[in-house]
Image (spheres, rainbow, N blue to C red):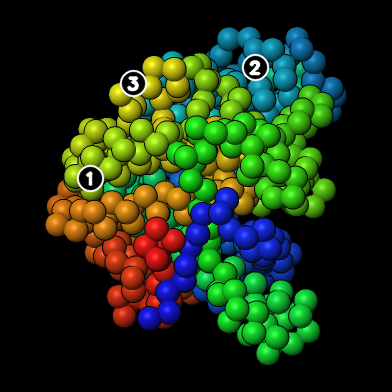
Amino acid sequence: MALDKRKNFKKMDPDQQQRFIKSIIWMKAHDKAGAESATGGSYQQYVEWHRDMNPVIFKDIFDFTASTTGTLVATDHFISIKIDGKVFTPATYKMMSAPGLIAEFLNGLYAQNMPGNPELGKFSVIESGGIVTVTCTKGVYEPSEFICEISGVKKTFTFTKSSKVGDLTFSNMMVAHSGALFLPWHRAFIRLFERDLQTADEQRLVSELGSAPKKDEYIAKYEKLALPYWDWAVDSSNDSKSPKGYLWQETLLGGDGNEVNATEKDRLETGPFKYSDWKLYGPLPNYLQRRIGRQGASPPRALATVEDVEFLNKRKVYDVYPFDTKSPDTSFRNVLEGWFDIPGNTTRQRGEMHNGVHMWVGGTMANVPIAPNDPIFYLNHCNVDRLWAEWQRDNKGAEQYPVFGPVPGRRKTDEMIPWISGSAIGAIRAADVLKRRPFPANIQPILGEGYKYDIEI
């Protein structure tokens, strides 16, 4: 049985660390636009899959047009805004830019409770090339038109919906996070990425070594490339919790972001993924940002510890009602995902384990929908999967996934969006990935034979 072998990145030979880094760079440099394949797909598709499966319910693109010209000034303020025919009149806001002003207004409006939707999240508004993207972080309210009138110098800006990004519904968008499907979905996600990365590695080796036979000799000697993991619980007790730690060396994943100026905050300027060499898929800015250990929070952010993992491993049930962020601490999934505040964490921000890593690295990683733009995303999720694999090994008699309870779209036998029947990949269900040494025969054409961790070797 030829299972791929995943290893601790920190313990890998330096040449194999570089092999992983070079293959990610090769994969992105040779992206195939629109490709969806487990044998040569694009880096971009993974960012888009993750973006579209996150809890961003409202995501429409609006044309930005001005009925009059002129420079916006600090004394400008909204007269009114129309949403689906209903006019709202806000208080005066200081001018930051048209998109910034709209975001501030909408967030203030939501704080006053949008009619019928008192629990909606916050809007963010980004302008690029004359297109304004409006995103709501929670909820299903979907305005069809904004008309924003700004006084002061008597300008009117009209925002009219021109196109919709995907078929985004509440059940689809919440599949990947905040529920029982979190671990199976990401297991399939990073396994598909791993297989595409292996293809990129083989292509790169042929190019560098000069022939397919030499590539085969290399792989026979060093094994097939597999995703490494970052054991952040161990590193939290040593210097890797620092921006100067092992992982963040310039020759490895690069360091912390630097604040270049007011418009280029936290830009990554070191390592193979620095701003001049690594462009993002997603909204501006078009470069990686990091705020290692300093993403705004009080108490300060910190990585989970070995003691936290010990607490996690004492959970003997995969998930419990209501199978979402409110599941109590008896839920292994909810603790690992990071929605439960581990007892004793009085000096740290709520949201440990997986969520805490995203926020501790900060920057692009903290923008969860597009977090796969930062390669550290894959090391984080490989470690999350490793912790789940250990739990499965130690709790073979436990229910591996709830049979009853999760909402439609998150059930054990539901097809996991976007990998559904008729898609280029084919259908993948939670039931298909609960075992991976090997995977069930029916899913091997998509996910390969399987993989194991160095702790299992």
Three-letter amino acid code at the position of disc 3 = Gly
Front residue of 395/333: it is 395
Label 3's element? loop
Percent position (x, y) of residue 251? 74, 50
Query: Could you give the CA–CA distance between mark 2 and mark 1, rounded to whole angstroms?
Result: 47 Å
Q: Counting residues from the N terminus, which is met first, the one under dot 1 or under dot 3?
A: 1
Q: Is residue 27 above or below residue 137?
A: below
**Picture quadrant where residue 355 is located:** top left
Which of the numbered marks, if any, corresponds to residue 319? 1
Which quadrant does the C terminus fall into? bottom left
Which residue is the extreme one toward the bottom? 213
Label 2's element? strand
Q: Nearer the viewer, mark 1 or mark 3?
A: 3
Q: Counting residues from the N terminus, which is met first, the one under dot 2 or under dot 1?
A: 2
Query: Could you give the CA–CA distance between mark 1 and mark 3, rounded to whole angstroms?
Result: 22 Å
Percent position (x, y) of residue 307? 36, 33
Q: What residue would you read off at disc 2? A: 78
Percent position (x, y) of residue 140? 40, 39
Residue 234 left/right relative to 216: left
Residue occupying the point 34% across, 74% down:
438
Three-letter amino acid code at the position of disc 1 = Asp
Front residue of 394/316: it is 394
Q: Is residue 306 visible?
A: yes
Q: Counting residues from the N terminus, which is met first, the one under dot 3 or under dot 2?
A: 2
Which quadrant does the N terminus fall into? bottom left
Residue 111 left/right relative to 405: right
Front residue of 69/191: it is 191
Q: Is residue 249 above or below residue 11?
A: above
Which of the numbered marks, if any, corresponds to residue 272? none
**Picture quadrant where residue 399 is located:** bottom left
Q: Nearer the viewer, mark 3 or mark 2?
A: 3
Q: Is residue 145 above or below residue 94?
A: below
